[in-house]
Image (spheres, rainbow, N blue to C red):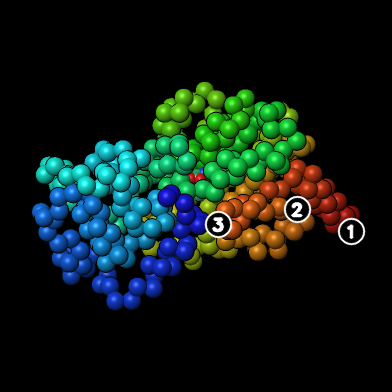
């Protein structure tokens, strides 16, 4: 229900972009048409039908909380009503008390007319069974890493997963992946890095809520600039960095432009942060460690630029295969090659 294709929910964004005959989102006609009177809506089913109709009419962008309007609207309504998310179908026949109907209408106005992402209205996002606090200071969590941790694909790349002791999440945002790592590797100390102090403030809230404030250390840093290599190196360097090319960010639907631009924008070709990360990772990795990076639609670009690092692409259920793993020995070999090349250049 909460899965999307990439950090910008690319497929959903395209679907929205081709709606030809809608008025501009904030224009007066849409404002008048978008939310007709709701006084006749009594049951949750009636509110859900209404919400779905409004989503379609306004051409809302999806992919941040769910990939279809039904799932997102149902989630939003249940959360606003404070009714359980795992309710059975009979909940649809429940009548909504008049006082609560005002709350639903106001929230739908914000979602449909203001294009505010559902997660910013509910102040939460879910990865699997894990709940994270979110607000406009962070991107809404939707990473593929959940799938790879849950399916033990990462474990399969490690010599001994039970011996993982040092892990780092670079570009941590809300801290969601650092927290998943800490849960998955209970004996590991976790570093979590972000350049945005706003994001780190949100990560701090989540660490406290998950009881991990002592085991996960937050660092304000431009990639690894302010974080020295740990003794013995990291067993895992994980990152879901900003990787969208700047031109893609310029053309994003409004919902995605409500997220911090620096969480999405990977520079001209999307690779700016990834290049820096791979350059700094070598001297920070344990001898049998791995770097794992989510790169969205950049697989071909990665294979072109980093073929010497032998990126290994991890399969995902929807076949987007957008996470790659790179081994410490490949980075070391590349660094050795660079040193040799530098030396021979200096000699000539
Ligand atoms: C795609 S978001 C990922 C957030 C989180 N890990 C997740 O999966 O939801 C990328 C994060 O990278 C951070 N960031 C951008 N540039 C950075 C840099 N140069 N160094 C460290 N973090 C950076 C952003 O602030 C943002 O929180």
Q: Quadrant of the C terminus?
A: bottom right
Left or right, residue 275 beside residue 268: right
Foreground disc of the pair 3, 2? 3
Query: N-terminal of the two: label 3 or label 2?
Result: 2
- Dots 3 and 2: beta carbons under 8 Å? no
Between marks 3 and 2, how big is the CA–CA gap? 25 Å
Mark number for residue 40? none
* Residue displayed at 47% across by 48% down: 142
Q: Is 107 above or below relative to 287? A: below
Between marks 2 and 1, how big is the CA–CA gap? 27 Å
Left or right, residue 339 beside residue 98: right
Query: N-terminal of the two: label 1 or label 3?
Result: 3
Q: Any atom of ligand 1 within 8 Å of the CB at mark 1?
A: no
Residue position marked by numbered label 2 in the rendering: 309
Between marks 1 and 3, how big is the CA–CA gap? 51 Å
| Secondary structure of the residue carrying numbered label 2 | helix
Tell me residue 248's x, y (percent): 48, 65
Tell me residue 161's x, y (percent): 69, 32
| Secondary structure of the residue carrying numbered label 1 | loop
Tell me residue 300's x, y (percent): 65, 64
The answer to whether any part of residue 206 appears in the image is: yes
* Residue displayed at 32% across by 40% down: 87
> Looking at this rendering, what residue extends furthest in the top direction?
214
Residue position marked by numbered label 1 in the rendering: 348
Mark number for residue 318? 3
Tell me residue 75's x, y (percent): 33, 47
């Amino acid at each position: 229900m909460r899965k999307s294709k990439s950090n910008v929910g690319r497929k959903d964004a395209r679907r929205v972009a081709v709606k030809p005959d809608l008025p501009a989102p904030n224009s007066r006609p849409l404002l008048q048409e978008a939310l007709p009177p709701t006084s006749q809506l009594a049951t949750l089913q009636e509110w859900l039908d209404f919400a779905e109709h409004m989503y379609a009419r306004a051409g809302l962008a999806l992919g941040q909380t769910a990939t279809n309007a039904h799932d997102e609207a149902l989630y939003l309504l249940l959360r606003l009503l404070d009714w359980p998310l795992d309710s059975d179908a009979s909940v649809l026949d429940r009548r909504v008390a008049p006082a609560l109907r005002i709350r639903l209408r106001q929230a739908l106005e914000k979602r449909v007319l203001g294009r505010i992402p559902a997660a910013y209205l509910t102040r939460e996002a879910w990865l699997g069974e894990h709940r994270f606090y979110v607000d406009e200071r962070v991107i809404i969590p939707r990473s593929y890493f959940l799938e790879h941790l849950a399916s033990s694909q990462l474990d399969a790349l490690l010599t001994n997963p039970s011996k993982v002791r040092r892990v780092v999440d670079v570009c941590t945002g809300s801290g969601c992946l650092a927290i998943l790592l800490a849960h998955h590797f209970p004996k590991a100390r976790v570093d979590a890095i972000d350049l945005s102090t706003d994001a780190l403030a949100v990560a701090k809230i989540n660490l406290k809520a998950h009881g991990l404030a002592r085991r996960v250390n937050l660092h304000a840093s431009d990639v690894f600039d302010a974080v020295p290599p740990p003794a013995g190196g990291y067993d895992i360097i994980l990152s879901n960095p900003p990787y969208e090319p700047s031109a893609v960010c310029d053309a994003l639907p409004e919902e995605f432009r409500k997220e911090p631009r620096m969480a999405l924008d990977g520079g001209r070709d999307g690779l700016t942060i990834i290049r820096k990360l791979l350059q700094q990772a070598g001297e920070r990795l344990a001898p049998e460690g791995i770097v794992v990076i989510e790169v969205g639609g950049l697989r071909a670009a990665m294979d072109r630029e980093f073929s010497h690092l032998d990126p290994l692409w991890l399969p995902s259920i929807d076949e987007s295969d957008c996470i790659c793993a790179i081994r410490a020995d490949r980075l070391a070999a590349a660094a050795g090659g660079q040193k040799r090349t530098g030396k021979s250049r200096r000699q000539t």
